[in-house]
Image (cartoon, helix red, strand yellow):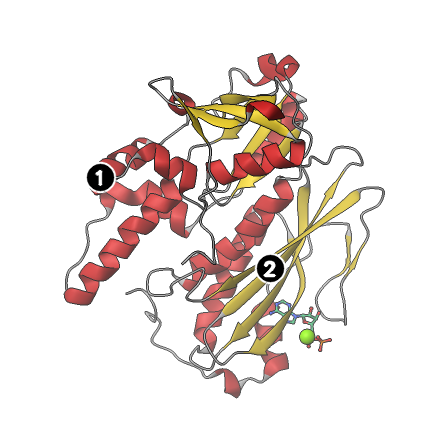
Amino acid sequence: MIEDKNPQRTPLSELGEFALIEHLTKNFDVKHESTVKSIGDDAAVINPENKNIVVTTDLLVEGVHFDLSYAPLKHLGYKAVVVNLSDVYAMNAKATQITVSIAVSNRFPLEALEELYAGIETASKIYNIDVVGGDTTSSNSGLMISVTAIGEVEKGQEVYRSGAKPNDLLVLSGDLGGAYMGLQVLEREKEVFKVDPNNQPDLDAYTYIMERQLKPEARKDIIDLLKDLDVKPTSMIDVSDGLSSEILHLCKASKVGCDLYEDKIPLDPQVISTCEEFDIDSTTIALNGGEDYELLMTISQEDYPKIKANPNLTVIGYITEESAGAHLVTRGETKIQLQAQGWKTFKE
Ligand code: ADP
Ligand code: MG
């Protein structure tokens, strides 16, 4: 559908590994003082001064995590960076460097990798990070891309999953369900396209949710906001697998329970209307959909006045004793036990 709009196809074999790396990484400038040595040696050198360093990695595999028939390579490059940065922000840290490793089959021409790297470059500009290294190798089947992100945090300011206490407020950034419903629309259009390649879909009603799927953003702004508001969450996690399983991760790590209120879960109007169109319950989507990359945190009641007026943060519930369990309180005020039904790679 979108793949291969670029008419030029330069085989990777024309360049060789070193020329390829040089070509792909030539635009990466160094923005951070802590980046002492970037691409070009056997390893990068980073000096975090007196900070704590956070490190996280994600691996994306074609056919498992992305489908190039509707995910443009530029967006894929962007997303591969963003999903890692989201994990750094979930530690209350500032993302500073990444490395990018790719395995690529000869099905891809140079121009495809240029697209991928254009997305990586855009993300590194927007999120202000240095690309300091990586690895390039061949693959027999499809594309794999692995990003490692490095961040720094003042000692003692890091936030784990494990700090939530009974009576803390459960707080969420942004809204949920968009990425999952965007994927439903894309999958549907892919089927329509298979039947009739001349059918040009009208996707105007789905712009927000398709962007949530194809070009997600990590909530760097929330980390900056929390700092400005002088709020240190007691625990935090990024919502990559759906709200339900992330809440259960926080509860398990913190040894607490929680009450989540159905009527407080923030949903975009496009999510609500698309759920109606697909005849799916929007709460189910918010609980079990994935890839929204919002931040879920707990904050102490004392900090409530500081966040109360902020449109980016919604109180969706509160923390209870572990023995009370983790529940959804429905609009009809019945309590349902939360279940982990996140998007699991190995499911089915
Ligand atoms: P080595 O053989 O020591 O692994 P490479 O030739 O693979 O070295 O890499 C040379 C330099 O280019 C290193 O700084 C490495 O981190 C960087 N590099 C290699 N592949 C990539 C890539 N896909 N993206 C960014 N940097 C890369
Ligand atoms: Mg190497």
Residue lying at 48% horizontally and 71% vertically, measured from the top left: 143
Query: Where's ligand 2: which quadrant?
Result: bottom right
Query: Residue 332 sits in which quadrant?
Result: top left
Q: Foreground residue, 339 or 42?
A: 339
Residue lying at 47% horizontally and 22% vertically, measured from the top left: 311
Residue lying at 42% horizontally and 80% vertically, measured from the top left: 107
What is the secondary structure assignment of the residue under circle 1? loop
x, y (%) of residue 133?
A: 68, 65
Which amino acid, by three-letter code, is at mark 1? Answer: Asp
Please name the residue that numbered disc 2 is placed on.
Answer: 147
> In the image, 15: left or right of 35?
left
Q: Quadrant of the C terminus?
A: bottom left
From the Cβ of disc 2, is ligand 1 less than 8 Å away? no
Q: How many marks?
A: 2
Which amino acid, by three-letter code, is at mark 2? Answer: Val
Q: CA distance from mark 2 to mark 1?
A: 36 Å
Nearer the observer, disc 2 or disc 1?
Answer: 1
Ranked by sequence position, the earlier of labels 2 and 1 is 2
x, y (%) of residue 276?
A: 22, 36
x, y (%) of residue 215?
A: 43, 50
Q: Is residue 321 above or below residue 255?
A: above
> In the image, 267: left or right of 233?
left
Q: Is residue 111 above or below residue 121?
A: below
Residue lying at 49% horizontally and 60% vertically, measured from the top left: 77
Please name the residue that numbered disc 1 is placed on.
Answer: 279
Taking the image as drawn, is residue 220 in sight? no
